[in-house]
Image: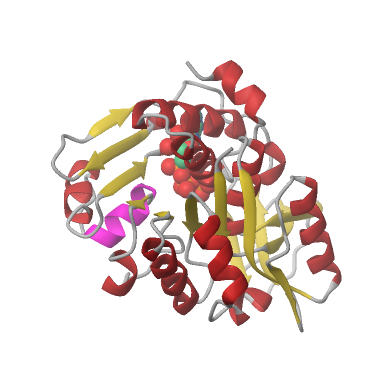
């Protein structure tokens, strides 16, 4: 079984559904409210666990009711939460307003995620024991850099989702094996809107890149090789939230099992395509049996 450590965020998404988002200073009456476990770290952890990985989550929740709920949700998905600390104060929250056009406006408050500025011996040991380390950018950069460096020094493969996108220091990129931006993040990081051109620029700093292209699939590029476009299965998308995290979680499991890149991408693409056919993020992530039944 692929052992995966996820160093990342855990948030409670507080989602208000409304016909129209309020203007500044205005109050509108919405239709529905939902609390949905989220955070890119936790989402990737759940996706990887469902896809068949043995997953340890490294991060923090608050000592509030959301923290307990978030921990329970991860444990229910089979994720090891021994290294998910409970910090004093509120859990991370994302305050999301979704209007009838499907557009959203989001305020993220890091809460407990923000206290993860450094790693302890337990976290370093868990990273060293893993086959792969998954990271995103919703924790303080100092912790992400430390995690990447620790993984690399132990020969643990590192995968970074550069979201929310921000300039990436060399001290981080020097320790990344595979960068998985979406189209928008790739353009922002490379200054190139065309994915092939963006990949070529990004390959100057990391050995492998996968740019996810939504319904168009994904572009894989490695130093010294020709970029390859992998099509996504044609499906009726209902809600694409969490597609990127599902893709990365499943990809990590498949790579850790030693599948060649093309097979690993087929597995990840099937997982993500199954995710977009159901509403929600972590709730719509598929289990291994569903992915295997679907993957060609
Ligand atoms: P999100 O932020 O919605 O989680 P993202 O922007 O990080 O997603 P995308 O590039 O939109 O990432 O999607 C990731 C992967 O999910 C794609 O490479 C593709 O394999 C799959 N995917 C996304 N949208 C669709 C779709 N409409 N049909 C089939 N597959 C899809």
Q: Nearer the viewer, residue 150 or 247?
A: 150
Q: Nearer the viewer, residue 53 or 277?
A: 53
**Residue 139 in the image, given as x and y percentages of width and height:** 54, 71
Left or right of 296 on screen, residue 199: left
Q: Quadrant of residue 153?
A: bottom left
> Is the residue 269 above or below the residue 58 in the image?
above
For the point 33% across and 43% down, which residue is it?
210
Left or right of 216 on screen, residue 77: right
**What is the magenta segment's predominant secondary structure?**
helix
The verdict on residue 188 being magenta is yes
For the point 77% across and 60% down, which residue is it?
70
Does residue 29 appear in this view? no
Left or right of 54 on screen, residue 225: left
For the point 62% across and 81% down, which residue is it?
115
Q: Nearer the viewer, residue 236 or 110?
A: 110
How many discs appear? 0
**Residue 45 in the image, given as x and y percentages of width and height:** 62, 50
**Residue 211 in the image, given as x and y percentages of width and height:** 34, 44
Does residue 108 appear in this view? yes
**Residue 162 in the image, given as x and y percentages of width and height:** 41, 60
Residue span colored magenta: 182-190
The verdict on residue 84 being magenta is no
Q: Check the image and tell me how it is coloured.
A: secondary structure
> Is the residue 281 above or below the residue 126 in the image?
above
Where the N terminus falls, by quadrant?
Answer: top right
* Residue that sits furthest to the right in the current view: 65
């Amino acid at each position: 079984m692929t052992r995966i450590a996820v160093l990342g965020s855990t948030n409670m998404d507080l989602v208000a559904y409304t016909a129209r988002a309020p203007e500044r200073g205005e109050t509108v009456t919405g239709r529905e409210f939902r609390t949905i476990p989220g955070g890119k770290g936790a989402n990737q952890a759940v996706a990887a666990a469902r896809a068949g990985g043995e997953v340890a989550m490294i991060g923090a929740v608050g000592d509030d009711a959301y923290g307990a709920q978030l921990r329970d949700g991860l444990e229910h998905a089979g994720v090891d939460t021994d290294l998910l600390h409970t910090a004093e104060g509120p859990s991370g929250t994302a305050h999301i307003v979704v209007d009838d056009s499907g557009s959203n406006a989001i305020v993220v408050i890091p809460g407990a995620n923000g206290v993860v500025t450094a790693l302890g011996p337990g976290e370093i040991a868990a990273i060293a024991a893993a086959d792969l380390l998954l990271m995103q950018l919703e924790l303080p950069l100092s912790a992400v850099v430390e995690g990447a460096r620790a993984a690399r020094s132990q020969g643990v493969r590192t995968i970074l989702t550069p979201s929310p996108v921000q300039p990436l220091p060399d001290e981080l990129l020097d320790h990344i094996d595979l960068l998985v931006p979406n189209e928008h993040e790739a353009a922002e990081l490379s200054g190139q809107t065309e994915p092939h051109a963006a990949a070529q620029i990004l390959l100057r700093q990391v050995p492998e890149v996968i740019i996810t292209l939504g319904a168009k699939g994904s572009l894989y590029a490695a130093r010294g090789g020709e970029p390859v476009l992998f099509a996504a299965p044609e499906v009726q998308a209902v809600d694409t939230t969490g597609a990127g995290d599902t893709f990365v979680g499943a990809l990590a499991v498949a790579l850790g099992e030693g599948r060649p890149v093309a097979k690993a991408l087929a597995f990840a693409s099937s997982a993500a395509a199954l995710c977009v056919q159901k509403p929600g993020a972590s709730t719509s992530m598929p289990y291994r049996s569903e992915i295997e039944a679907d993957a060609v």
